[in-house]
Amino acid sequence: MTVKAMNSKEIARKVIEKKELFILDVRNEGDFADWKIEGENFDYFNIPYFELLDGVEEIMDKIPADKEVLVVCAKEGSSMMVAEMLSDEGLDVSYLEGGMKTWSEYLEPVKVGDLKNGGELYQFVRLGKGCLSYMVVSNGEAAIIDATRMADVYVNFAKEINAKITHVFDTHLHADHISGGRKIAETTGATYWLPPKDAGEVVFEYEALEGGNDVVIGNSTINIHALYSPGHTIGSTSFVIDEKYLLSGDILFIDSIGRPDLAGLAEDWVGDLRESLYKRYRELSEELIVLPAHFMIIEELNEDGSVAEKLGTLFAQNHGLNIEDENEFRSMVTENLPPQPNAYQEIRETNMGKITPDEEKQREMEIGPNRCAVR
């Protein structure tokens, strides 16, 4: 039977379209338990590849004959080997091209909607990491918000739609992934913006993104209104774009809220988080469409693959927005924290410009799930 490579784009479409897929994951049990390719209609079987070195006969009854089968490992080699063994046993199987490292880096662009005066807003969904980034386009200019380190994806996408990148923003100093903001700005000549309250230790120049800023993209058709909303970090800043979209950074997600502890100051910042969510956001229109910087569970994806919901719906349905007792909220946020992201201190130092790891090291630092939320 045949063995073929399946790339991350093909898998992303299966996730978004809720297709069936059987995944044989041959990484170590701990790695699989910590982080895997998620899909609403995916089934899994995990066995470390070294247990299959003598053959796959003992697991043949675990592999369905009526489903598409994908073999997954960390870097590709082991999954290719196991796929070939399964093929020799008469199965049609695929292996994940580039392994989980490549899946972690894949970005799926989704058009969120049109803006006034002919602009467009795109969301880049990083399915393997739960990161969400954005491109605002107007009159041949583009602004990028919360870019991942895969800078070429944004630069090439802008070229494809004939837009010049003029501004790059980070809503806060990220701790779970390496920002591509500075790299994109250096490549394109764009202005790089960062909240100054998060930038006390950065070693590079930036424009101060503060509450009350209006940054014009294109022919004065789109204004990005910075909204200071601390809590996840002390400088966390949200954007209201076109009076229609609320880019909430890591303050508010669809099914959860942002954690305030990645600088080691959960007790200090939980009050800021509550004030942002329960006061500042309550003053906004409930018709605003919330576009967060992360998602936590695959069920947060909409039918088109986007992650978005009206603010009023979140006020009604998001548990983190409906805890009336302040002490209960404080306990939920400070005592219910998931494990901190892998290498988060090194990631913060990289985003400050203090260290410059090589590309392979950066990949290793980011491997693992999104852990920016509490729910």
Image: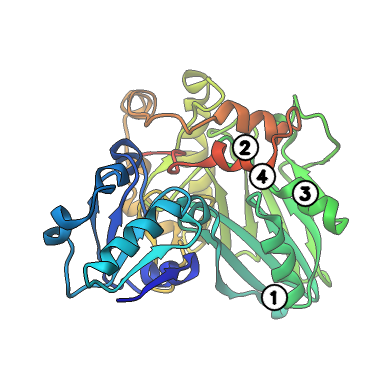
Give the amino acid type for the residue marked by disc 3 in the picture. Lys
Label 3, label 1: how far apart the Cα atoms are: 25 Å
**Quadrant that contains the N terminus:** bottom left
Closest to the camera, between mark 1 and mark 4, is: 4
Q: Earlier in the sequence, mark 3 or mark 2?
A: 3
Give the amino acid type for the residue marked by disc 4 in the picture. Ser
Which residue is at a point 79% across and 56% down the rendered structure image?
167
Label 1, label 4: how far apart the Cα atoms are: 25 Å
Residue matched to label 4: 179
Q: Dot 4 lies on which element?
A: loop
**259 left or right of 159 in image:** left
Q: Earlier in the sequence, mark 2 or mark 1?
A: 1
Residue matched to label 2: 361
Rendered location of residue 150, percent (x, y): 65, 54
Label 3, label 2: how far apart the Cα atoms are: 17 Å
Residue matched to label 3: 183
Label 4, label 3: how far apart the Cα atoms are: 8 Å
Q: Dot 2 lies on which element?
A: helix
**Quadrant that contains the C terminus:** top left
Which residue is at a point 88% across and 56% down the rendered structure image?
189
